[in-house]
Amino acid sequence: MALKGVLSAIVTPFDSNGEIDESALRALVDQGIEDGVDGFVPAGGTGEFSVLSHQERIKLVNVVVEQTAGRATVLAHTGATSSREAIELSRHAERAGATGIMLATPYYERIGYEEAFAYYAAVADATNLPICAYNFPPSTGLHLNVDFLVRLATEIPQVKYVKDSSADIGQMNTLLYEHADKITFFNGEDIIMLPALTLGAPGMVMGIANFAAPALATLFKASQTKDDATIASVWRQINPLIRVLGQASYNSGVKAACELLGLRVGSVRAPIPAYTQAQNETLKNVLSKIDPALLTKAAR
């Protein structure tokens, strides 16, 4: 299956003891498919990978691949602070049956482009899966610019996609219009969803797909048919939501929205700050103004 369309950066549900809630995760996968997502990204940023153990990340990929059962793609995030762990996680993703792997570059210990290139090359040598580079400079400290991404895709043929969460509209334009034959652009930043859609981006990886997949599926279909009126109409409804989620911890907001809409996902894991009562009230108010048909069917 090819990677395309709406990919849900699926949250990691936790139970009351703070452990992975497997039954809730399976239910979330089923609900996402019913709501219209094309695929899932387990153990990504919205999945709180930075506070998960190695074994927990392995478990997430196993469960999501098993539960999708071929009904949706699975882009397993296997990025790590060391090439060694990224290779281990990537090999596991391949054995588990993932469609592809997404790799954020190592963080904390600063690296440059040569080190990043070697990191991607090492993972490519260790697996046969297609690779999606993950560009999120606020968290990794390294902006994967156009020249680097084109070099990566040209010299490492397994690198076929980029999830770009840099919010760099100029870079998005260049990748879509000048380099689409070399690397496939997936938008990973909610706030630039409107220009990404109007420019015909072939895919998106979104945390709000956990609870607003119908809206995103509608937007993507409209983008493919160049239905700008529908894009504008839906965007106007969800833009206030995206603005609210951008004002505090994004992961906390996505999980809070899921809970408000009837999706059992629990809270975030410390030290990620949970939403306060006041933040929950603001979020609830914003959600109440969105057409229910654009939100998960679990809330209807």
Image (cartoon, helix red, strand yellow):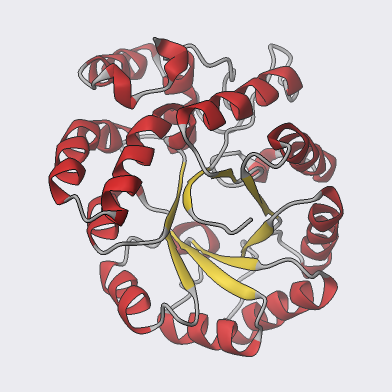
Q: What percent of the width, then of the height, locates residue 181? A: 45, 81
Quadrant of the rendering where the N terminus is positioned: bottom right
Q: Position of residue 256 (x, y in %)?
A: 45, 20
Q: Nearer the viewer, residue 103 or 276?
A: 103
- Comparing 200 with 22, the one in front is 200
* Residue 269 in sight from this viewpoint: no
Is residue 150 positioned above or below 16 on the image?
Answer: below
- Residue 37 in the figure: left or right of residue 2: left
**Residue at x 32% of width, y 38% of height:** 218
> What x and y, as percent, mark residue 5?
45, 51
Vertical placement of residue 282 versus 38, above or below: above
Locate residue 57 relative to residue 235 in the image: left or right. Answer: right
Residue furthest toward the front? 225
The answer to whether residue 89 is visible is: yes
**Observer-nearest residue: 88 or 225?**
225
Residue 49 placement (x, y as % from top left):
66, 44
Q: Nearer the viewer, residue 247 or 1?
A: 1
User: In the rendered view of the protein, which quadrant contains the C terminus?
Assistant: top left
Which quadrant holds residue 250?
top left
Above or below, 23 against 143 in this view is: above
Q: Residue at x 33, y 70 (%)?
A: 172
Residue 239 sits in quarter: top left
Q: Quadrant of residue 175?
A: bottom left
Determine the residue positioned at 49% across, 34% down: 251
How many discs mark residues in the rendered view? 0
Q: Residue at x 31, y 26 (%)?
A: 294
Is residue 177 rendered to the left or right of residue 262? Answer: left
